[in-house]
Amino acid sequence: MKNLLEIEHLETLLHTGNAPVRAVDGLSLAILPGETFALLGESGCGKSMTALSIMRLLPAVGEIVAGQIKLNDTDILQLSEMDMRTIRGKRISMIFQEPMLSLNPVLTIAEQIEEVLNQHLQLSKDATRQRIQELLEQVGIPDATQRMHEYPFQFSGGMKQRAMIAMALAGEPELLIADEPTTALDVTIQAQVLDLMRQIQRRTHMAILLITHDLGVVAEMAERIAVMYAGEIVELASRDDFFHRPAHPYSQQLFASLPGKQKRDQALTVIQGSVPSLAQQFNGCRFVDRCNQALAICHHTVPKWYPATSGSHQVRCHLYLDQQNVTKKPPANNA
Ligand code: SF4
Ligand code: MG
């Protein structure tokens, strides 16, 4: 199958302090039509900046300095802002952790969805009203005919999240980017929202790029997983490989840091140390200061990609330089 989205060597800088922060540093990934692909990592590792780069909605201090983002065969980084507007909402939509980032407090829910519809589809007034109602019903808003005329503040947190999803789906996108879509919601509502996304995906065959720090959400939703650390991807795996045979020491330590048997249902807890500053150039592995399996080489040589348990399971770590090392843990200092 042909990829829907292909990101190649994306580099996104944030011009904040003295030196630019390399928020996304040479990231490549590909998403198939209809699949759910998770980008997993701690906060501050570049997940959201990756999403905002795809949408071309970076904050004013953000700048994409290299790479390609191809939607089918079009490099959307080359498009004018005008052309990009025909893609945003229509072919790629995004939902955020905080619905108020995308809901306008001074417009009713119906007015906001209508804006999206008017941008992308030529519908009559009646058909527009009909479509808004359908969308709100689809995301499980009760009494949609009445409630569509309410303002965001009249909706509960879960309802706002649903309204935002309805808005994101209005243009029938091929790719939905969901950045921590359920983090702010309580557990029951969280399950409902994930379930809703899955149902809609089954119906429309849209792909989902799920951005999360929550292993439970990944286990629930993702077919493939990219683990992101300090601006780059360090492991690429199927759900099965990731949960049964995590290959990168970072992934392994994430699992090890979770308490007891509820591993799949827990958010990532903090492992020792913190993500290094991304304002620097790295000469070795970015994870070396926190890695419990570091070798001497890790301090002065940037690791390449290697196959882990299978060809599609890839890992960026010196331990896999020799395939024989795949199953046995090498001695601590044999560079
Ligand atoms: Fe650890 Fe070295 Fe692998 Fe980095 S390259 S994760 S420091 S073993
Ligand atoms: Mg984020």
Image: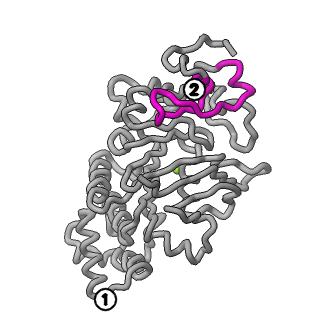
The tag on residue 245 is: none
Q: Is residue 319 above or below residue 20?
A: above
| Quarter of the figure with residue 162 | bottom left
Give the left or right position of residue 85, taking residue 260 as reference.
right
Give the left or right position of residue 219, taking residue 104 as reference.
left
Residue type at mark 1 is Lys
Q: Where are the magenta residues, as a range? A: 295-321
Which residue is more in the foreground, 225 or 231?
225
Q: Evaluate whether residue 23 shows in this view.
A: yes
Count of labels in the image = 2
| Quarter of the figure with residue 169 | bottom left
Quadrant for the C terminus, please.
Answer: top right
User: Is residue 49 on the magenta stretch?
Assistant: no
Secondary element under disc 2, as helix, strand or loop, is loop
Residue type at mark 2 is Gln
The tag on residue 125 is: 1
Query: Percent from the top left, x then y, of residue 88?
Result: 49, 69
Give the left or right position of residue 236, taking residue 53 as reference.
left
Query: Percent from the top left, x then y, of residue 243?
Result: 39, 31
C-alpha distance separating marks 1 and 2: 57 Å
- Residue at 48%, 64% (x, y): give it: 101
The tag on residue 272 is: 2
- Residue at 25%, 80% (x, y): give it: 130
Q: Is residue 257 above or below residue 130?
A: above
User: Is residue 301 on the magenta stretch?
Assistant: yes
* Mark toward the viewer: 1 or 2: 1
